[in-house]
Image: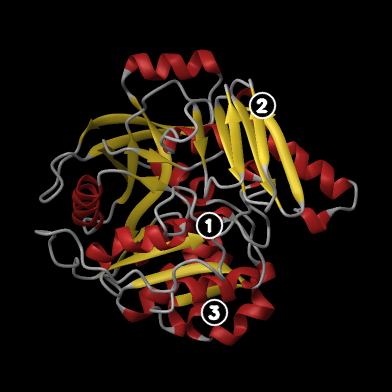
């Protein structure tokens, strides 16, 4: 399991794919790096959340892979917003970033204050700046397709729209929010642009199946592209005091310690996206690349190849501490001990130095409750 100490220590400055366009003028990649990934406990902890780990076997943490993916579009214009607890690890994994390119939140206030702070910083530098907000812990396939959609999104954002990337659903997922897609709304440089009718909360299984069959809904992956001043204008409609405070912090960074706790804890979806959609200000680009937010061990298993040495198993990390016979599922043997599975179907075994999780893929969503139970028992040292 890669941590800040043992993950590759460069800033993701590899050149983009052959033929990749130059970085987009005036575009900055904003990467909110927060959360604790409780459904991936005990790999993901509050002190070392999932974005700091290599969960795909690529040799890069999810954070590093996110920066790598955005470099061809943004060049050196990258801002990472993270918590004080993770600042040291983030800087260690991304030493190519200048000190001012890591915005450090004194305490978590959800996604809107984090992204809004970045927008206020960019607005001071260039009122026409366009930002793209992309979470640090997502996995995206077909990067050329991703780059093409973001290029369209930047063109659309320059018209004053809030643009989101909607993922074409592959199954009736109940763990994601959805975007209800409306009429075509193309602009120069963004021929695939559509109107957003509404953002829809996570549905039950029946409603999710209806969304999939109807073809008018996309998964909401929380990826937004917008001019910095437009985002602050939209936020100001419902939260004027937050915008005033964020602009003050951007002008005087030392104020962040004393003013941060006054900001409302709210997600960008509720603060801006939903009311802006109701006002007709949001557009969506259907994105047809593979995407996953690795929300639990079941989704992680789907991303890993089957082990050649252990048929039927997906193995995270080196396999020298694993013996298996007749088992299927996912094993992460990272506690330094031998892990043996015999005749178990769809098992999930995660062995770390201080905790062992044994469950099934069917019960993966319940791991979050284990973290809560440990905290109730006073074992926050394990979470």
Residue 107 seen in this snapshot: yes
- Image quadrant in which you'd find residue 35: bottom right
Counting from the top left corner in percent of width and height, residue 363 is at: 66, 26
Counting from the top left corner in percent of width and height, residue 381 is at: 81, 59
Image height check: is 11 above or below 37? below
Q: Are circles 2 and 3 on residues that touch, CB within 8 Å?
A: no
- Which sits earlier in the primary sequence, circle 1 or circle 3? 1
- Image quadrant in which you'd find residue 82: bottom right
Left or right: where does residue 132 sit relative to residue 142?
A: right
Identify the residue shown where x is 19% and y is 67%: 23
Q: Secondary structure at mark 1?
A: loop
Q: CA distance from mark 1 to mark 2?
A: 23 Å
Label of residue 363 in the image: 2
Counting from the top left corner in percent of width and height, residue 241 is at: 58, 66
Image height check: is 8 above or below 248? above
Q: CA distance from mark 1 to mark 3?
A: 31 Å
**Nearer-the-camera pick, 173 or 228:** 173
Image height check: is 294 above or below 124? above
Image height check: is 327 above or below 251? above
Residue wearing tag 3: 249
Residue wearing tag 1: 53
**Nearer-the-camera pick, 177 or 39:** 39
């Amino acid at each position: 399991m890669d941590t800040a100490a043992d993950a590759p220590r460069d800033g993701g400055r590899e050149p983009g794919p052959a033929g990749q366009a130059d970085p987009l003028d005036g575009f900055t990649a904003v990467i909110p790096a927060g959360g604790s990934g409780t459904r991936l406990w005990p790999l993901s902890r509050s002190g070392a959340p999932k974005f700091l780990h290599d969960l795909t076997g690529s040799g890069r943490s999810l954070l590093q892979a996110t920066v790598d993916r955005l470099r061809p579009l943004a060049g050196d214009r990258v801002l990472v917003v993270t918590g004080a607890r993770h600042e040291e690890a983030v800087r260690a994994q991304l030493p190519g970033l200048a000190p001012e390119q890591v915005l450090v939140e004194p305490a978590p206030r959800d996604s809107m204050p984090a992204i809004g702070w970045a927008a206020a910083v960019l607005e001071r530098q260039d009122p026409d700046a366009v930002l793209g907000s992309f979470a640090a812990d997502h996995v995206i396939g077909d990067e050329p397709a991703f780059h093409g959609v973001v290029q369209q999104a930047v063109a659309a954002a320059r018209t004053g729209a809030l643009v989101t990337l909607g993922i074409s659903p592959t199954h009736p997922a109940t763990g994601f929010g959805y975007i209800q897609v409306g009429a075509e709304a193309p602009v120069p440089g963004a021929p695939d642009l559509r109107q957003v009718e509404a953002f829809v909360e996570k549905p039950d299984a029946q409603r999710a199946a209806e969304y999939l069959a109807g073809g008018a809904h996309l998964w909401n992956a929380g990826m937004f592209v917008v001019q910095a001043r437009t985002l602050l204008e939209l936020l100001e409609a419902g939260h004027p005091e937050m915008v005033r405070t964020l602009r003050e912090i951007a002008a005087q960074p030392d104020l962040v310690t004393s003013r941060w706790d006054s900001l409302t804890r709210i997600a960008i979806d509720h603060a801006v996206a939903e009311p802006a959609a109701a006002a007709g200000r949001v557009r969506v680009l259907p994105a047809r690349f593979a995407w996953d937010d690795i929300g639990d061990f079941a989704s992680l298993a789907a991303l890993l190849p089957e082990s050649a040495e252990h048929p039927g198993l997906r193995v995270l990390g080196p396999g020298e501490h694993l013996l298996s016979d007749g088992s299927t599922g996912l094993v992460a043997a990272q506690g330094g001990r031998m892990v043996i599975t015999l005749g178990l179907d769809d098992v999930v075994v995660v062995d770390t130095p201080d905790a062992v999780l044994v469950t099934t893929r069917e019960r993966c969503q319940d791991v979050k409750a284990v973290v809560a139970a440990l905290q109730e028992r006073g074992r926050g040292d394990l979470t």
